[in-house]
Image (cartoon, rainbow, N blue to C red):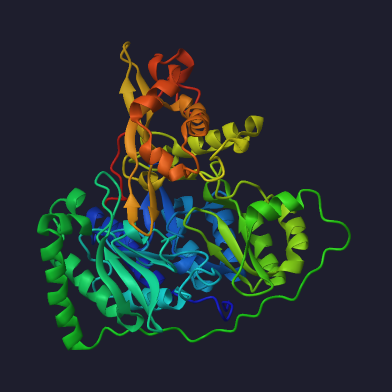
Amino acid sequence: MATQPHIPRFSDPRDVDEFVQKLEAFEKGEISPDAFRAFRLTRGVYGQRQEGKQMLRVKIPAGVLGKDQLDALADVADRWSRGYGHFTTRQNMQLHFLDMADAEAAMRRCDEAGLTIREACGNSVRNVTVCEEAEICGSAAFDVTPYAEGLVRYFLRHPLAATLPRKFKIAFSGCSSDCAYAAIHDLGFIAKSENGTAGFKVVVAGGLSTLPMTALVLHEFVPAPEIARVGEAILRLFDRLGNRENRHRARLKYVRKKLGDGPFVEKYLELRAEVDAEAKSELKLPDSAARVPAPPQVHEGPSPNGYLAWRASSVVDQRQDGYAAVYVRLLLGDIDSKQMRALGPILEKFGDGSARVTVDQNLLIPFVHVRSLPALFVELSTLGLAELGVRTARDVTSCPGAETCNLAVTSSRNLGRAISDRLSQQDALTLPGAKETVIKISGCPNSCGQLHIAGIGFHGAARRDGNGTTVPMYQLHLGGGVDERGATFGRQVVKLIARRAPEAVARLLALYGEDRLENEAVEAFYQRVEPKRVIAYLGALVTEPARPDEVADIGEEQGFLLHSGAGECAA
């Protein structure tokens, strides 16, 4: 099956062949369980907390996909997973509850559509993420997508790409607002232009987890053709100096912390000179592909019921005259196989055949003629893909949590659903700040849900009450975000019983309404407000002991069981 002309192909069937060979060798006892584990992780096969079940992570570089890719993902979801897939903050799709015996078939179906699982997990160069509005935003210096694709191809199957001390993450943003969160990545590129020359501000060694660190500015400006050399030098630095003894101190940010910013930059410059002298690390841009937006599809008759609210909530104007881009809100990043199969033809009928996975777990459909918007709304509505509230407090970002992850303490996805439901009551989105507040959740402190850069963030925890009962909790973080200054990390304020967190969100929005200064933005308020004031305002949600109906996690009926397993995200 051929992919659409402008949807890049990244897969190679030889990657699947190699996986099969290694699996057979493992089953024959020719390679150890640890060796096979390290290998399969670099091929996107990740163990779940459910014994014998696997998660398959499929890379979607720059978040770009079309009908062929959606059809393939739908087939994998139906045949070998659970009927739906989960988009992540890294613009991947994760498909859970696969049997190892089905991994080859699932991989080959992905390969038919050009989708790769190579270096999707493990100690590797992970998926390269891009701001979803890169090609359409009026504030962008230029479209960074071709440069991101060029860097993807440079690092994919690179000799060092799967043998690093830990994972290595790259992001591209189109403008200084840094919508792709370059500031929390190992390597980030923020587009800018100087004297008519396209280039990038380069930032390095950022990260979240238990030691959040905003990225260091490596170059205020570097010409665009040089970014592969920058990346090569940083990768060599990480390979040579990264901690291979303690995986919990192995990310690039720990190399920076150990050396100090000045010596870190000096080491980079030394390796950059080495790379420049070799003159091999050149960026190859992809060939320009035809992008043909569909002609207008005019809806006959009056505007459909609910169209105007959807238009205001979900549609952004493009810098290309006459076209708009449409956000599709996905609850917690989930999309079922029926929706995936139906969405592909919609992309071709109303757009240019492509969609973008967003870093907030939604989809964006670009190049929709403005006259086609009512008709597109009708078709999306029939699929349940015209939900309001995209990029508001109801649009919660969450990691998979205790549903599948060995490291997770709590069911973060269930909290995400509960918060969205709570804010649907009594028209809570009319509260001041509700449309601007960013909420992110992780089931443990590792921040896969990026909680540290949310206005309101939560990470899963546990605490014993006076009777010795373990109660599921969430640590509340306030005031995180990313902008042109870099990353600001939310302050830890107080722990809350899990079942009280949705109501706490509603009260935090009310607190903003009461205590904000004139014209004070949500982000500024949550960075300013005193923790004592927050705790006092939350009142009994903080002070009252757990009731009998609160000792189970959200979505569970039985008492809370603290699970402790070996997580593979840190492997």
Residue drawn 70% across and 52% down? 310
Q: Quadrant of residue 472?
A: top left
| In front of the other: 262 or 349 | 262
449 to the left or right of 313: left
* Residue 236: x %, y % from top left: 19, 71
* Residue 459: x %, y % from top left: 37, 37
Residue drawn 72% across and 67% down? 370
322 to the left or right of 318: right
| In front of the other: 496 or 110 | 496
Residue 369 against residue 375 in the figure, above or below: below
Farthest residue, direction right: 301
Residue 207 against residue 48 in the figure, above or below: below
Residue 505 against residue 245 in the figure, above or below: above
* Residue 353: x %, y % from top left: 63, 72
Quadrant (top left, top right, bottom left, bottom right) of the N terminus: bottom right
Label tally: 0
Q: Is residue 232 visible?
A: yes
| In front of the other: 98 or 445 | 445
Q: Is residue 443 visible?
A: no
| In front of the other: 208 or 564 | 208
Residue drawn 47% across and 28% down? 504
Farthest residue, direction front: 518
Residue 31 against residue 237 in the figure, above or below: above
* Residue 378: x %, y % from top left: 77, 56
Q: Quadrant of residue 444?
A: top left
